[in-house]
Amino acid sequence: MGSILIPHLKTGWHVDQAIMSEEERLVVIRFGKDGDQDCMKMDETLFKVAERVKNYAVIYVCDIEQVPDFNTMYELYDNVTVMFFFRNKHMMCDFGTGNNNKLNWVLEDKQELIDIIETIYRGAKKGRGLVISPKDYSTRHRY
Amino acid sequence: MMNKKSFLQMEAPANYVAGLGRGATGFTTRSDIGPAREGPSEEAIKAVLAKRAQALGQDAPSSFSKDKKEDEDDNDTERYQDPENEVGLFAGGTYDEDDDEADRIYAAVDAKMDKRRKIQREAREIAERDEYERKNPKIQQQFADLKRGLETVSDEDWASLPEVGDLTGRNRRAKQNQIKRFYAVPDSVLAGARDQGAMDTTVQEDNADGTMTNFASIGAAQKKVFGSRLDQVAASSNDSAGGSTNVDPKGYLTSLNNSVIQSITEQEVGDIKRVRSLLDSVVKTNPKHAPGWIAAARVEEYGNRIVQARVIIAKGCEHCPTSEDVWLEAIRLNESQNAKIIVATAVKNLPKSIRLWIEAARLESDTRAKKRVIRKGLDVIPQSVQLWKEAVNLEDDPNDAKILLARAVELIPMSVELWLALARLESYSNAQAVLNKARKAVPSSHEIWLAAARLQEQEGKGDAIVSQVMKRAIKQLSDISAMLKREEWIAEAEKCEEEGAILTCQAIIRETLGWELDEDDDRKKTWMEDAQNSIGRGKYETARAIYAYALRVFYNKKSIWRAAADLEKNHGTKEALWALLEKATESCPTSEVLWMMLAKEKWQSKDVDGARRVLGLAFKQNPNNEDIWLAAVKLEAENKQFDAARSLLKTARNEAGTARVWIKSVAYERQLGDIDAALELVNEGLEKYPKVDKLWMMKGQIYQGENKLPQAREAYASGTKACPLSVPLWILASRLEEAAGVVIKARSIMDRARLAVPKNPQLWCESVRVERRAGNLQQAKTLMANALQQCPSSGLLWTEQIMHLEGRSQRKSRMVEAIRKAESDPVLIVTIARNFWAERKLDKAAAWFEKAIVADADQGDTWAWYWKYLLEHGTEVKRADVLSKLSVTEPRHGEIWQAIAKAPQNATKTPEEILYMVVEKLE
């Protein structure tokens, strides 16, 4: 249900516009296939937190089959990839997974997601390019 | 729900390149699948452009591609462009057909302008560049001619180019510091510098033949030499202590010298070659040094090269003809025939050497020849006692010997030995004369006096004459102040005793014991010590004589009497003991100990009437003495005279009604099985002596025996109230409760007991045992920890812990701890012995049992354990030995021993019987 209610970015231009049009908020974009099960789960979580983070973050989804422009650039090979941007800058976050560029697993805990988004927003406001995730996902992701 | 941005509803521009508009850059996290680092790739842009052109039905835009070409020509501009603003002012704008057209027009204009005046412009540009290059020549061009010269430089020249020094001032200080830094010179350098000028004189013959030095064997040999040297030093010190009293410093040194070199030959097994070369050099450098020759010969002998040895020693004889040692060594190394020749030469060279003469005599096999040699020797050295003795020994006929000795004493009047030998050979009367002469010749010799005394004794002249001789001896010797010390006289007396001259021994003691001692009571102590020492050396006659003398001086001293009686009891006859004890009781009639000893001795030799008589006499002397009363009772009781014993006890109670008499009375009744009478007596006794715990205990035990538990309990309760400090009473009370099955009560009694008598190991132990027997092992352990804190040096507690509360694996460490805290506690020692026994370390177990008995022979339990051990592992002899020792010591204490020995039905048992019973009771 979340996939339907979150605004979709239909083309690369929309993606760029979404990223560039926000001056004060974090832009959270989920890249993935809308029909994928992992994506649906992730969208569900994103949809549930969207209202609660709306003051400092805006959430979009983007189907990588519809918009293949960023697949190479952003290495979009996973089922679900969530990326963060702030004032046209790609925000990195050390999740402990070894890939600081994106969140590429299904996160079903709402509070954890909120925490991550908030942490990245706070870092971004201070001018940081890389923040450290409040929780280490290395073990959780592996097992 | 979400404030939607307007762009979401808009259409995307037709030829938009994703990411290009916002200058997006990608990233590479995984190189295997990795993409471009940059934003939209060139292909992507071209593809978009082509797609757009197709959609518009035009050619692909040329300007963009032309731009690209220019970029390729000179990509410097691209490279140094501001990355934030890389596509110019209109980067964010869309690139549509109008733009393209404008671009193309501009491009056409530029091309046109470029074509105009192209030739002039190019010529001018070339001229300008040349002018500029001439003014600012490049370094490369400046050195161009020199560079060309480098062609001739060969590889070697390149290799030998000098290193460029650091010409800058920046590192100068660091460098100077580096120069100033000092380093410690290693010891090896110093040692090398020291040895530089020195000449190395060590002979390394091991290396000469190419083999390696065997350091291990050298080390072993050195160790052996050192050990043998130590042995020799010990032996020589023993010799000097035992035998010769005067030390000739010169001779001592030479003998030391000899011994060192001899030891080399005997001990250095490992490197005989080395020693040989060493001694070779010794002999060569100092050929007049006799021990060197001897050592060299011995080395050869040791190496089984006897011929070589003889050659060396013959050379030695040539070089040192005045050394009798060399000659003796030569004689020893040669066969008897050659030896005779050598000894003849030797005697010619050294006619005054007694040893050579004796050696010569020894070499002769025939007695007559021997005599001849010795006589020759005596002609040359008439003053030699040794030669004279040899001569006398060779004579078979006593008469000839006498003649020889007579001559000898004429020549050497100072030799006591010869005088004594002569006296020994002569008949009694002549011997007296000889001794008299000898005395005149050597007035300071006590040996002659002793010989005289012993002569009298041998002739059976009796005590009087012997002591007269001794008296005269003392007088004369003290006149010329040649008196020996007291200790020496005692030693002489002991020697006489050893040789069977008892009378002389006694006489010596009698005359000399008081010598040089002050007339005070210290003498008693000294004499007792002397006697003890003599007993220790096994010289009982001497000790007896000392006691006799002491008793004559200190007639009334009980202690001497007792010591003397002990001596007789242990090492003398029964009659002597009786006589002595009777005398003792006469001299000290008030000493009940002596009376009792006498009575006991009489009784033990089945002389019951005699014992009675003695006791009767003792009564007369010591009326109302409880010991004697009780002894009498015991005597009667043992001889089954129950009525007599009973009446005696009654009288005793009336006349000497001490607590002990009461206790004994009750015990006696209990022993006879007359419980009512016993009970009556106990109550009577308790009225008189309510503070005597033993009476309370007996009362309780009587009730307990009758199985009247409430009464027993009451007896113990009032007992503990009357005597709160009596440990056994508390324990009995607790055991009563425990036997009745009321552990709680027992526990509370023990708690009270510990309050009344703090820090008592027995009470603590009993408390622990109450818990242990009730099965509360945990509680027992806690209590034990507490107990050990209170009484850390109690063997009893340690034993309880080690044997019952500790796992087998921890016992050892516990024992180590215990033995540190309670060193000589016999109970603990027995425990350790038992553990050794359990671990089958039998020798150690036996040793520890012995140790325990030595620590406290009064502990019956120790004996019992030892006996149990011996039953399994001991020999018959050992068992008999232990039994005899046991009956002498008569142990009376020990936990189990006491319980069994004190039981009324065992009152008449001997220690041996009790021992058997105790062994059965041991856990």
Image (tube, rainbow, N blue to C red):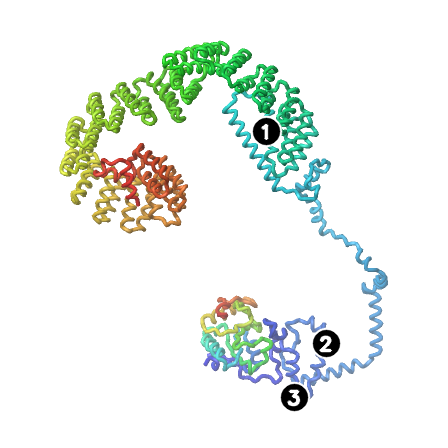
Label of residue B172 in the image: none
Q: CA distance from mark 2 to mark 1?
A: 108 Å
| Of pointers 2 and 1, the one earlier in the residue sequence | 2
Question: Do the residues under discs 1 and 3 have CB atoms within 8 angstroms?
Answer: no
Task: Identify the residue at image location x=38%, y=23%.
Answer: B529
Establish if B275 lies above or below B163.
above
Give x and y (percent) for residue B290.
65, 26
Point out which mark residue B259 bears: 1
Mark 3: secondary structure: helix
Amino acid type at circle 3 is Gln
- Asked if both marks, 2 and 1, belong to the same chain, the answer given is yes
Which secondary structure, mark 1?
A: helix
* In this view, B443 is above or below B369: above
Mark 1 belongs to chain: B
For the residues labelled 2 and 1, say whether their Cβ atoms are less than 8 Å apart: no
- Label 3 Cα crowd, 10 Å radius (few <14 / some 14-19 / many 20+): few
The dot on residue B54 is: 3
Residue located beneath label 2 in the image: B72
Residue at horizontal 48%, vertical 82%? A4
Q: Is residue B477 left or right of residue B547?
A: right
- Residue B104 vs residue B121: left or right? left
Write down the chain letter for disc 2: B
Q: Earlier in the sequence, mark 1 or mark 3?
A: 3
Horizontal and vertical percent position of residue A109: 45, 72
